[in-house]
Amino acid sequence: MGRKINRRVFIHHTSTGLAATAAFPALLTNSGKVFAEPGEKEISLDDYYQMFGVDEKTIQEVMAAALSHGGDYCDLYFERSIYNSASLEDNLVNRAYSDIDFGVGIRVLKGDQTGYSFTEEITPQAMKLAATTAANIADSKNILKPSKLEFHPTPDYYPIRTKWLDVSIDARIPVLKDINARTFAADSRVIKANVSFSSISKYVLIVTSEGRVTVDDRPMGRVGVSVIAEQNGQREQNGYSISGRYGMEYLTEENIARMVNEAVSKTVLLFDAVKPEAGEMPVVLAAGSSGILLHEAIGHGMEADFNRKKVSIFSDKINKPVAENFVSIVDDGTNLNARGSINVDDEANDVEKTYLVENGILRTYLHDRISASYYKVKPTGNGRRESFRHVPMPRMRNTYMLPGPHKKEEIIASVKNGLYAESFTNGEVFIGAGDFTFYVKSGYLIEDGKLTKPVKDINIIGNGPQVLKDIVMVADDFQIDEGSWTCGKNGQGVPVSLGLPTVKVSKITVGGVNS
């Protein structure tokens, strides 16, 4: 079923342990082992039923109520999330916060129409009332009965050694202080640091009227530092974070040192930054975090709901060329411990590595249950939701471009005058046409085939599908970014990852000093 966890520890953390956390929100318990000892029982489906206080009989009765008006299908999404965070500013731990979210969302489908209701009170009465509310989307005398429930096991794409509920506040504070001390020691120009450390332990149980039952234990950790530095009266700010579905063991000496170095170096570099001349020019996208441009300006346009509704410019492009033949783009739910990975999607569908663009040809969209039915294909495992309060919809997971045939040095050397864009922030994208504006936080001028002066405070403006066509070189140095990306869509946020090899776009409009 995935990660091996002692059943006794699991029940303690997710029932009585929650009561302790709720009573003392800034104090986390540290109670026991992570793995099952020989002879001890691993967690089972019954343990999830116990955590949510339900059984098969109750679930079947709730689903019968959801289908009572003639719905075609229904599902129940149970969720219990435990969130903990602490932060340090001005050399003091100034905030420690805990929160628990608990409830069930009930969805009924009739064709492509959705009825949805949720309740934070998981009792038979409250769930049946919510189910009856969702059932009102349908009005038919053809009443389906829910199928017999069968457990569907899933892979484990985020194995960890230390569950976050085993990490006390006393174990987190030294990490905050260590990062803070490293940040100030890294450069004498640093005058302020804000360090944050958060984690989420999310347990989900998903049951469908077709009889599929799945569970998932979804850890998430994030550590970040924001830096302000000053030089000759000039102040600059930047930062860096690392995030993923990992446990405490990820915060090694090497990873913390890298995070601090990235945050400080990216900040002090801005003291020497300039603005390029405005105009259309070649732009080289750096490997890693510049994949946000791919995610926002191209990835959203490949989500199936936008194409089903004919909103996206890609709605008539399946099996047609959209890029050069050395360009391939995937959305992958299976990358080990990546922030956007999921063992099962929020509709109980299996996840996969989905090839969106293969050798320049658009092959498929990102599908949830509704769009897959419309296009008569299998769901790709992209039905995601923010919480039990939200309906699932097609969402990205880990979206990235695969390595190409070129070298980074070869790409930079090919540019006479252009821009090397390293990191972005504050982007705006119009999904239909794919038009975008992105603020380049850091990068370099390219002059005569070499990186020269750092740049800052500039915009790039373009069209995602056109940029895809204008990619003329792709390097073999792919990186998936480790930052704490959260993707917003229709008022919902979900964790994602993104990545890119070094990529040359023949022309993008850059807003510089003459703009």
Image (tube, grey):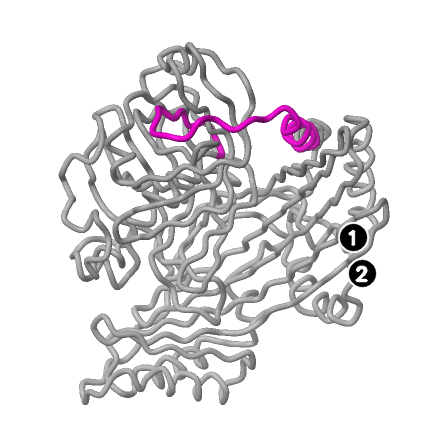
Give the percent coordinates (x, y) of residue 254: 69, 27
Compared across the picture, whether 454 is left or right of 462 comes to right
Residue 280 shown in magenta: yes
Q: Which residues are magenta?
A: 260-289
Depicted 33 relative to depicted 74: above or below: above
Camera-side residue of 171 and 365: 365
Camera-side residue of 122 and 179: 179
Residue 290 shown in magenta: no
Q: Amino acid at mark 1?
A: Ser
Depicted 98 relative to depicted 68: above or below: above
Count residues near mark 1 (Cα–Cα under 10 Å), then give few for <14, some for 14-19, many for 20+. Answer: some
Give the percent coordinates (x, y) of residue 74: 33, 74
Compared across the picture, whether 457 is left or right of 200 comes to left
Q: Amino acid at mark 2?
A: Leu
Depicted 43 relative to depicted 340: above or below: below
Question: Pointer 1 and pointer 2: residues touching (CB < 8 Å)?
Answer: yes
Compared across the picture, whether 492 is left or right of 347 comes to right
Secondary-structure class at tag 2: loop
Give the percent coordinates (x, y) of residue 91: 85, 44
Q: Residue 168: which numbered mark, if any? A: 1
Q: Give the residue displayed 34% in from the left and 32% down from the top.
A: 508
Count residues near mark 2 (Cα–Cα under 10 Å), then give few for <14, some for 14-19, many for 20+. Answer: some
Q: CA distance from mark 1 to mark 2?
A: 7 Å
Tell me the residue that label 2 is attached to: 27
Secondary-structure class at tag 1: loop
Camera-side residue of 119 and 41: 119
